[in-house]
Amino acid sequence: MVIKAQNRMLYFAVLAGILFLFLAALGPGIFSSGEIRVNSWQYRVFDVLCHQDPERSFTFSGVQMAVCSRCLGIYGFLAISWTGLPLYAYFKNSSNNRELVWLIIAILLNLTDLIGNYFEIWTNTHTSRLILGSLFGFSIPLILANEFFNLKK
């Protein structure tokens, strides 16, 4: 298995971008030991991507993270899945294309959780949102395995 030459730089550029997003998602608590400003650059990066509700966000070093718990799961497992993409591509059965099904299931689970919480059928928690976001973040890169890797037998 090799990284396709035409996509090698793109793969590593996307990896660097995803790792940057994950570190930024942890919020200013990871980068500062002094007084934390509410208008920190981490909050501004995710302002249009996440509602950043303090009641739905974890804290790091006593400071609210830059994203909610669901988005933290998405970015964290997006980074893990993208980093493990070469290994996944190596073991992937080329005749099996279930990645899109996994992504659709992850989306449906997240929608079900949102709807159930909205109609007060149940109350989701930081942990449930983190887990469901993680499923979504983990499944996204798997669809792209064939674009960046090929098996030479």
Image (spheres, rainbow, N blue to C red):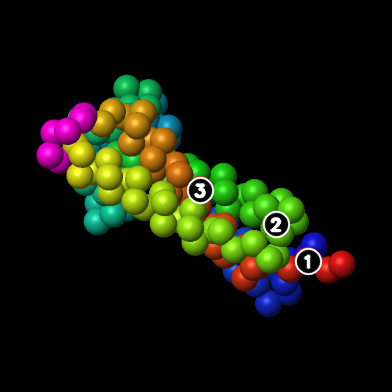
Q: Nearer the viewer, residue 146 or 113?
A: 113
Residue 63: assigned label: none
Question: Which amino acid does the dot numbered 2 rest on?
Answer: Lys
Label the magenta part by its dominant secondary structure.
Answer: loop
Question: For the residue labelled by badge 3, is the local secondary structure a helix, a strand or a loop?
Answer: helix
Give the quarter of the image for residue 28.
Answer: top left
Q: Residue furthest top?
A: 62
Question: For the residue labelled by badge 1, is the local secondary structure a helix, a strand or a loop?
Answer: loop
Where residue 5 appears, x then y in whole percent?
A: 73, 74
- On whether residue 126 falls in the magenta region, the answer is no
Q: Is residue 89 visible?
A: yes
Question: In 3D space, how far apart are the residues under numbered discs 3 and 1 (Cα atoms)?
Answer: 22 Å
Q: Is residue 17 visible?
A: no
Question: Which amino acid does the dot numbered 3 rest on?
Answer: Phe
Residues at marks 2 and 1 touching, judged by CB atoms closer than 8 Å: yes
Question: In 3D space, how far apart are the residues under numbered discs 2 and 1 (Cα atoms)?
Answer: 9 Å
Question: Which amino acid does the dot numbered 1 rest on?
Answer: Leu
- The structure residue drawn at horizontal position 21% and vertical position 29%, both measured from the top left corner, is 123
- The structure residue drawn at horizontal position 57% and vertical position 49%, both measured from the top left corner, is 81
Magenta region, residue range: 118-123
Residue 138: assigned label: 3
Where residue 24 appears, x then y in whole percent?
A: 41, 44
Q: Residue furthest left?
A: 119
Residue 92: assigned label: 2
Give the quarter of the image for residue 53.
Answer: top left
Which label's residue is closer to the chain start, 2 or 1?
2
Residue 151: assigned label: 1
Question: For the residue labelled by badge 2, is the local secondary structure a helix, a strand or a loop?
Answer: loop
